[in-house]
Image (spheres, rainbow, N blue to C red):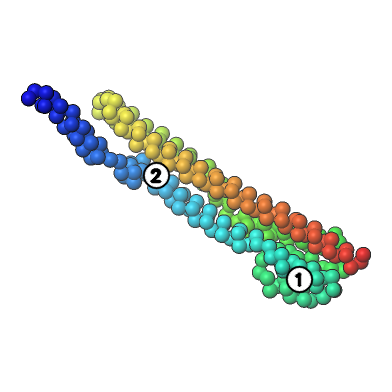
Amino acid sequence: MLQNILLQVPATTGIDSTLTASSTSINYFELLLKGGFVVYPILILLFVTFFLMVERYIFIKRSSKIDFGFLRSLKDNILRGDMRSAIAMCKSTNLPISRILEKGISRIGRPVKDIESAMEIQSNLEISKMEKNMGYLGLIAGVAPTLGFVGTISGIIRIFYEISVTGEFSIETISNGLYEKMIASFSGLVVGLIAYAAYHGINMLIDKFSIHLQATVMDFLDTLNEPAA
């Protein structure tokens, strides 16, 4: 009889521990809001980061398309000397590459330096359109972690101020206050990391397009020499 009672005790303890663990499950959203007032601007920066990241990615992917069929048809028109058709093709294709080539075609007959200079200026304009609002991502990458650090410091100041006023000093009071304020630092670092990765990832897409753009411009300038040859 005594053995049966002893065998039943661990089972009951296991059930109690399971109920205790389930009753103390963490609500991460409520935990996040315990980070203080600094968490709210950090969340706003997170939404702005995602918006800019998606908007720039879609814009750059759409603008960096290069239709090689269009380039072949354009080259054939240039070799035939049909500049009107070539310009009409460029105007009907609403892409950065077509606008750059149109600048070059419209200046055929002038010195090559003038053609190259006009295309380079237009290329810089198209690249600047792709880089629009990229500065905000870089700013968020620096501001978000700083906001989190400010939240942590302000929380620590408040903890020690309350200790000095009430005269109560306990590990529980300090640890509860500290873990709540460390949430602000953690949130700021995560948002800053996302913004930093988005900033450099989108810049890599722009650099890739810039390289393709330079190759296309060089091919266009070589095409201009083919009729003379």
Give the residue displayed 23% in from the left and 40% down from the top.
23
What label sits on residue 131 in the rendered view? Answer: none
Kindly report which numbered mark, 1 or 2, lies closer to the viewer in this rendering.
1
The kind of residue on which mark 2 rests is Val
Give the residue displayed 89% in from the left and 68% down from the top.
227
Residue 6's place in the image compared with 102, above or below, is above
- Where does the image place residue 195, in percent across and percent down from the top left? 52, 47
Tell me the quadrant of the picture where the N terminus can be found: top left
Q: Residue furthest top?
A: 2
The kind of residue on which mark 1 rests is Ser
Give the residue displayed 72% in from the left and 69% down from the top.
70
Residue 124's place in the image compared with 91, above or below, is above
- Where does the image place residue 225, in percent across and percent down from the top left? 88, 63
| Disc 2: CA contacts within 10 A as few (<14), some (14-19) or many (>=20) | many
Tell me the quadrant of the picture where the C terminus can be found: bottom right
Task: Name the residue beneath numbered marker 1.
Answer: 73
Using the image as rendered, state which of residue 44 and residue 55 is in the foreground.
Answer: 55
Using the image as rendered, state which of residue 61 and residue 135 is in the foreground.
Answer: 61
Quadrant of the rendered image containing residue 104: bottom right
Q: CA distance from mark 1 to mark 2?
A: 55 Å
Instruction: Specify whether residue 99 is in view.
Output: no
What label sits on residue 39 in the rendered view? Answer: 2
Residue 144's place in the image compared with 157, above or below, is below
Instruction: Specify whether residue 208 is in view.
Output: yes
- Where does the image place residue 190, in percent across and percent down from the top left? 46, 42
Give the residue displayed 85% in from the left and 73% down from the top.
81
Q: Residue furthest left?
A: 1
Judge from the rendering whether residue 6 lies leftward or rightward of residue 192; answer left or right: left
Q: Earlier in the sequence, mark 1 or mark 2?
A: 2
